[in-house]
Image (cartoon, grey):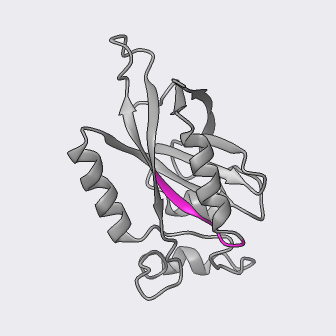
């Protein structure tokens, strides 16, 4: 997967995303971003990802349906100083993932990445985000003020920011 030059939020999807994530406070909210890669240009060297839809998801961290803790119990147990809860962790409900993927395919779109909030911290990847993210890939994080930042996660130790643009046809 190639790193996007930047990510474009189309037609107020950035505002929709911020509102969805803010509504989950004091817990972390989570969403799936849907759109296209390189659809505005034939010049694929630009590699722009366009977010056209936001799929609001349920954070099931620690609930009966949650699988991340069970699958990563050794790594999680090494996080001795952390009190893990929905306030600093998220897991997207599998049914939300499947439904968003199906909807995207039916509408000739792609699931681009997930987004989540850090209502208690800054909008950069946390240790837990890096632990559970499957690199390489994009992650969008909102802070308590609703400010969005995009990050390309190369591996569990390396990540860097990706520029965000807001594009509106209205």
Measured from the top left, where is residue 84 in percent x and y? 65, 79
Q: Quadrant of residue 46?
A: top left
- Relative to residue 152, is residue 84 drawn left or right? right
Q: Quadrant of residue 100?
A: bottom left
Give the residues drawn in magenta, as a range. 26-32
- Relative to residue 168, is residue 106 drawn left or right? left
The residue sitting at 29% across, 47% down in the picture is 104
Instruction: Evaluate whether residue 146 shows in this view.
Output: yes
Q: Which residue lies furthest to the front in this view?
A: 170
Question: In which quadrant will I find the N terminus?
Answer: top left
Measured from the top left, where is residue 134 in percent x and y? 43, 55
Q: Which residue lies furthest to the bottom in this view?
A: 64
Instruction: Evaluate whether residue 136 shows in this view.
Output: no
Measured from the top left, where is residue 137 in percent x and y? 46, 44
The image shows residue 87, relative to residue 52, as above or below, that is below
Measured from the top left, where is residue 23 in percent x and y? 65, 65
The image shows residue 73, relative to residue 44, as above or below, that is below
The residue sitting at 73% across, 63% down in the picture is 119
- Relative to residue 137, is residue 27 drawn left or right? right
In the foreground, 151 or 24 = 24
The residue sitting at 60% across, 29% down in the picture is 166
The image shows residue 13, relative to residue 102, as above or below, that is above
């Amino acid at each position: 997967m190639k790193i996007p030059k930047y990510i474009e939020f189309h037609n107020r999807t950035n505002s929709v995303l911020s509102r969805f994530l803010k509504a989950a406070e004091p817990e972390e909210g989570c969403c799936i971003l849907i759109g296209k890669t390189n659809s505005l240009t034939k010049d694929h060297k630009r590699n722009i990802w366009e977010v056209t839809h936001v799929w609001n998801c349920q954070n099931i961290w620690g609930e009966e349906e949650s699988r991340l803790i069970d699958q990563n119990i050794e790594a999680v147990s090494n996080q001795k100083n952390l009190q893990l809860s929905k306030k600093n962790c998220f897991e997207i409900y599998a049914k939300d993932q499947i439904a968003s993927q199906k909807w995207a395919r039916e509408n000739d779109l792609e699931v681009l990445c997930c987004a989540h909030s850090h209502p208690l911290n800054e909008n950069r990847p946390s240790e837990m985000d890096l632990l559970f993210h499957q690199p390489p890939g994009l992650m969008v994080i909102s802070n308590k003020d609703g400010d969005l930042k995009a990050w390309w996660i190369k591996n569990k130790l390396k990540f860097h920011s990706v520029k965000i643009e807001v594009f509106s046809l209205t």
